[in-house]
Amino acid sequence: MSTIRERFLLAAEESLLVVIDVQERLCQAMDQQVLGQLTANTAILLEAAQELQVPVAVTEQYTKGLGPSLPELQARLSGAGLHEKMTFSCCGSPDFVEQLRAGGRRQIVITGMETHVCVLQTVLELLDAGYHVQVVRDAVMSRARRNWETALEEMRQAGAVITCTESVLFQWLRVAGTEPFKKLSKLVR
């Protein structure tokens, strides 16, 4: 049985950040204003992850057809585990599953697209495998808002915590006044 702390209160040393399928051609079909928010928030989380030594897993769905991750994120993906996949769930990628197991992190923070397809299926499989999953509401999206809303509700019902970028950032930081706090808190001002 998990505790409130394990499920709801993120710790940098227990977290893995997952960025799902934020790819060039897929992004062309998205609302550009919402995509801008997703990209900015994902960039904040990637910078925080790098500063706080939170490992990152990045997936790309059928790269040949959908292209690579967005260029504005690629520069921040140095050191991330990159996993090409054909299954909608990231858990269908043996390399992704191996990164999860090898890292031993139990708190999984999810960003990416599309919320009602790849994000949803990944979250459900991670929950079923016993991970504590938090979905960053302002860093996931679908082409249609109703699909995004429905998927967030389904994931909440399944046991995922629905959160936001700033909550993740400040939970990872935990304490004000430190050098990481001074550096990273500027990202959300």
Image (tube, rainbow, N blue to C red):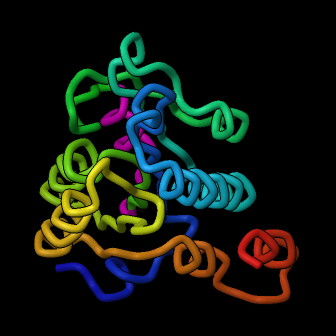
Which quarter of the picture shows residue 70?
A: top right
Q: Identify the residue at image location x=31%, y=51%.
A: 142
Taking the magenta stretch, the answer to whether it contains residue 102 is: yes
**Nearest the camera: 25 or 96?**
25
Magenta region includes residue 144: no
| Percent coordinates x, y for residue 85 in the rendering | 31, 23
Work out whether 138 lies above or below 2: above
What is the quadrant of the C terminus in the image? Answer: bottom right
Residue placed at 44% from the left, 48% from the top?
18
Q: Give the percent coordinates (x, y) of residue 156.
A: 19, 74
Q: Main secondary structure of the magenta part?
A: helix
Which quarter of the figure has residue 76? top right
- Give the side of residue 42 with respect to residue 47, left or right: left
Q: Is residue 119 above or below residue 34?
A: above
- The residue range painted magenta reads 95-107
Residue at 17% x, 53% y: name it.
129
Q: Is residue 137 left or right of residue 124?
A: right
Q: Position of residue 181 (x, y in %)?
A: 79, 78
Relative horizontal placement of residue 27, taking residue 156 as reference (left or right): right
